[in-house]
Amino acid sequence: MGTNECDSIDYESSSEGFIFVEMKIFNRITFNPHIMGGRACIRGMRITVSLVVNLVANGMTIEEILMEYPDLEAEDIKQACNTQRSSPVRKSIP
């Protein structure tokens, strides 16, 4: 796996043949039951992680997103994307 500024996952192999994924801290992702029904949001704002991830998945650049949502910062977008890749996962290796 190559590294870039958005990498946030550490992989390691175990003797049982598993790859464990370790999550790093996301200090910009918040959960509050009184904001957006408790969904993952960016810094307590009414901008959900899923919205940001969908914008990126549909081809918007960080710059375009920042123009549409001026309260966001580039690091917010990077962490939102990384939350999707950093779900705790355990995969069996054949």
Image (cartoon, rainbow, N blue to C red):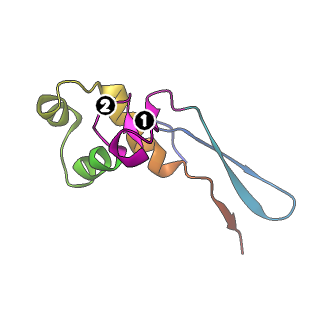
Q: Classify 10 Å Cα crowding around label 2: few (below 14), some (14-19), many (20 and above).
A: some
- Residue found 82% across the figure and 55% down from its top: 14
Q: Nearer the viewer, residue 91 or 68?
A: 68
Above or below — where is 36 with respect to 20? above
Residue 45 covered by magenta stretch: yes
Q: Nearer the viewer, residue 23 or 12?
A: 23
At label 2, which amino acid type do we have? Met
Of labels 1 and 2, earlier in sequence is: 2
Q: Secondary structure at mark 1?
A: helix
Q: Is residue 65 magenta?
A: no
51 on left or right of 60: right
- Percent of width and height locating residue 63: 18, 31
Query: Residue 57's spot in the image, x, y percent?
Result: 27, 54
Q: Nearer the viewer, residue 85 or 14?
A: 85
Return the residue at label 1.
79
Number of the label disc, if any, that sits on residue 45: 2
| Quarter-of-image position of residue 4 | top left
Kind of element beneath mark 2: loop
- Residue 32 screen position, x and y as percent: 45, 37
For the residues bearing labels 1 and 2, Cβ distance under 8 angstroms? no
Residue type of the residue flagged with mark 1:
Gln
Quick check: 68 left or right of 71?
Answer: left
Using residue 50 as the reference point, say whether residue 31 is left or right of it: right
Picture layout, residue 75 above or below residue 52: above
- The boundaries of the magenta stretch are 26-49
Image location (x, y in percent) of residue 35: 36, 39
Q: Residue at x 72, y 75 (%)?
A: 94
Q: Is residue 5 visible?
A: no
* Residue occupying the point 44% across, 34% down: 29
Q: Is residue 38 visible?
A: yes
Helix, strand or loop for the magenta stretch, by majority = loop
For the residues marked 1 and 2, what is the alpha-carbon distance in whole angstroms?
15 Å
